[in-house]
Amino acid sequence: MSIANLAGLGPKSAQMLATIGVTTAADFLAADPFELYRDMKQAGVPVSLNLLYAMIGAQENRPWQLVKQEQKTTILLRLDDMGLAPKK
């Protein structure tokens, strides 16, 4: 199975992940989505919170909208701890 076939992700997400060397679904599923987000951000990939929600959702086999609704605060706190919180 390719990354683009995982729920909530598609070809664009797969291309973004490929820029940091994540090219298989197995590699993606074994990785921490927060670290993937950080690595893509550091590589200059235009990441968004929706992409992070989608990556978490794909790993948990849940819709990204549900991840956002139920885990947004926890996700934002973790990003803040990593120094990656979005600026308002």
Image: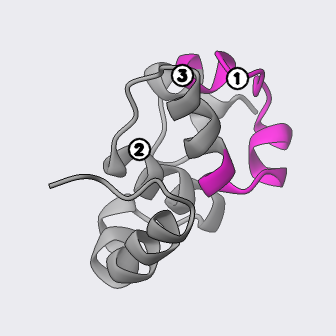
Residue type for callout 2: Leu
- Quadrant assignment, res 47: top left
- Give the residue number, with chain letter if any, for mark 2: 51
Q: Quadrant of the C terminus?
A: bottom left
What residue do we see at 38% from left, 59% from top? 85
Q: CA distance from mark 2 to mark 3?
A: 10 Å
Q: CA distance from mark 3 to mark 1?
A: 8 Å
- Give the residue number, with chain letter if any, for mark 3: 16
Instruction: Indicate which disc residue 79 carries.
Output: none
**Looking at the picture, how far across and down is residue 48, in whole percent?**
34, 41
Tag 2 or tag 1, which sits nearer the N-term?
Answer: 1
Q: Is residue 62 left or right of residue 72?
A: right
Please tell me whether mark 3 sits on a helix, a strand or a loop: helix
Is residue 26 located in the magenta-colored stretch of the structure?
yes
Tag 3 or tag 2, which sits nearer the N-term?
Answer: 3
- Quadrant assignment, res 69: bottom left
**Looking at the picture, how far across and down is residue 30, in whole percent?**
84, 52
- Give the residue number, with chain letter if any, for mark 1: 20
What residue do we see at 64% from left, 16% from top? 19
Residue numbers of the magenta segment: 15-35
Residue type for callout 1: Ile
- Quadrant assignment, res 37: top right
Q: Residues within 10 Å of mark 2 (few under 14, many from 20)?
A: some
Q: Residues within 10 Å of mark 1 (few under 14, many from 20)?
A: some
Is residue 23 located in the magenta-colored stretch of the structure?
yes
Q: CA distance from mark 1 to mark 2?
A: 15 Å
